[in-house]
Image (tube, rainbow, N blue to C red):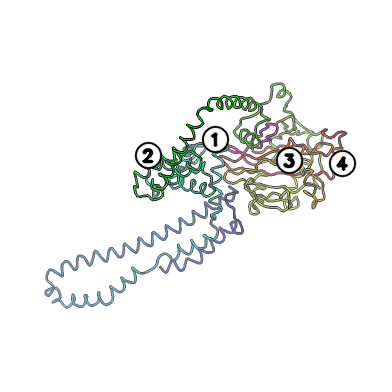
Amino acid sequence: MLWTRMELPCWCLLLLSCLQSLSAHNDFFTSIGQMTDLLYTEKDLVTSLKDYIRAEENKLERVKRWADKLDSLTATATQDPEGFLGHPVNAFKLMKRLNTEWGDLESLVLSDTTDGFISNLTIQRQYFPTEEDQTGAAKALLRLQDTYKLDANTISTGNLPGVKHKSQMTVEDCYELGKIAYSDADYYHTELWMAQALKQLDEGEESTIDKVTVLDYLSYAIYQQGEIERALEYTLRLLKLDPEHQRAKGNLKYFEFQLEKQRKAAEETARTQEERGKRDTSEKKKQKKQKNSFSMIPERKKYEMLCRGEGLKMTPRRQSRLFCRYFDNNHHPRFVLAPVKQQDEWDRPYIVRYLDIISDAEIEKVKQLAKPRLRRATISNPVTGVLETAHYRISKSAWLTGYEDPVIERINERIEAITGLEMDTAEELQVANYGVGGQYEPHFDFGRKDEPDAFKELGTGNRIATWLFYMSDVTAGGATVFPDVGAAVWPKKGTAVFWYNLFASGEGDYSTRHAACPVLVGNKWVSNKWIHERGQEWRRPCGLNETE
């Protein structure tokens, strides 16, 4: 006990130093890079918990030895009490035990060995993820499920592409996802995850969650989606398990009443059903014809299709115009002896990739500088211009200036040498790390005509071009996609992609609308440089027409 109290200040110092990087941070779910710190936090807690368990086991062992000794002694003494106490030493020891030793035992039993563990837990709790983090991570799973068309069982069993550390979900986990969806009135996902929880219970998995609770949520979620007959089936199953369930009994009557109304309505409209069915069939055929055109698909669907590697494919003729080459930017002195590898990714808009353009050592330095500064990425409100967080941008970012470290200055100079564009008016290097299901839904990098003040404070004009470094490989997901044209660029560590956001005339190129797909498996690090108009007057002369 004394040891624990003496060691507590050391524990505090150790934990405070370990957790220094976590202070002033929140929204853990938006950055896998910062979530790794939580693993070390949890490891420290486990170590502290084991110390507490050992102290408790040591205390119980001492109590057990005392009990075993007295059990033997009292068994002998009670066989001949008077004869036993006739020995003066036995009489003395009885007085001593009851007056002193039982008091010592009481103190031992009442001694609190939790001080060290509870203190450590209290210190670390202030750095724990919040309810928002848990909800954010849960919604990320639902987002990944939709984007990549994954069924609940695939996610629950952990069978995701390329995973190294497979992890299965319990009934409690599935139930929690269903509840979070339910709280958002998202009955579609409520049904999927409550059904998965029920499946695992039916397969015999032990859980503190019972089937009645799951069936209650499941039947209501199905009813809210208009499937009264299925809702009735699950309600009947619930009542078999709990015949006195009041809500289920009420729902049973209501569902039966609604089904009867539906049957009567169906009978009344039976005469016109055939004619209406013909019209519906012809309309469906028209819809199918429209869906054959990629341009007619809603942007959200195109975005998700491209994230899955589906969608528009280039014609052989267009593909034949894409090349790989060694690029020296018109014999730039930096690249005469060592030209860079340039690869065409897309023709309209023209997107190029540069291979082996940033070294592993430079990547690690950039991450090292950025990680302590990572904050939840924001977007500019198009109405107010105020920076704010958004559900469609799940990442953390930090800004690095050239004068902070020679590596950053060297990277800026390299971008300038390759693009031929002025970097003095460009924004600082932005480093981003994506979180659980991290994404950035379709957006423009440049300011549109309805956002005249988008970059007014910078005084450097619009964003003329974007340079994007990929600083990690991503096991699954995480592509950069351009929904309007059907382009998809996949992350490859050490490469960078570049495209112009504005035509030479200064007009915005709306085909550059792009998005970062959700990261399904892996950890995505990128850094980007937004290059502005000012200073490019002689480097990229204006075009003679609007779309040149």
**Closer to the N terminus: mark 4 or mark 3?**
3
- Secondary element at tag 2: loop
Residue 477 lies in magenta, yes or no? yes
Residue 515 spot, x, y in % from top left: 67, 39
Residue 495 spot, x, y in % from top left: 68, 37
Q: Specify the label residue 524 is tagged with.
A: none
- Secondary element at tag 3: strand
* Mark 1–mark 2 distance (CA, rounded to whole Å): 24 Å
Q: Amino acid at mark 1?
A: Lys
* Mark 2–mark 4 distance (CA, rounded to whole Å): 69 Å
**Closer to the N terminus: mark 4 or mark 1?**
1
Q: Is residue 199 visible?
A: no
Magenta-highlighted residues: 472-488
**Closer to the N terminus: mark 1 or mark 3?**
1
Q: Are marks 1 and 3 in contact (CB under 8 Å)?
A: no
Check disc 3 and report the residue beneath it.
Answer: 467
Q: Which residue is at the front of the view, 32 or 242?
A: 242
Q: Amino acid at mark 2?
A: Glu
* Mark 4–mark 3 distance (CA, rounded to whole Å): 19 Å
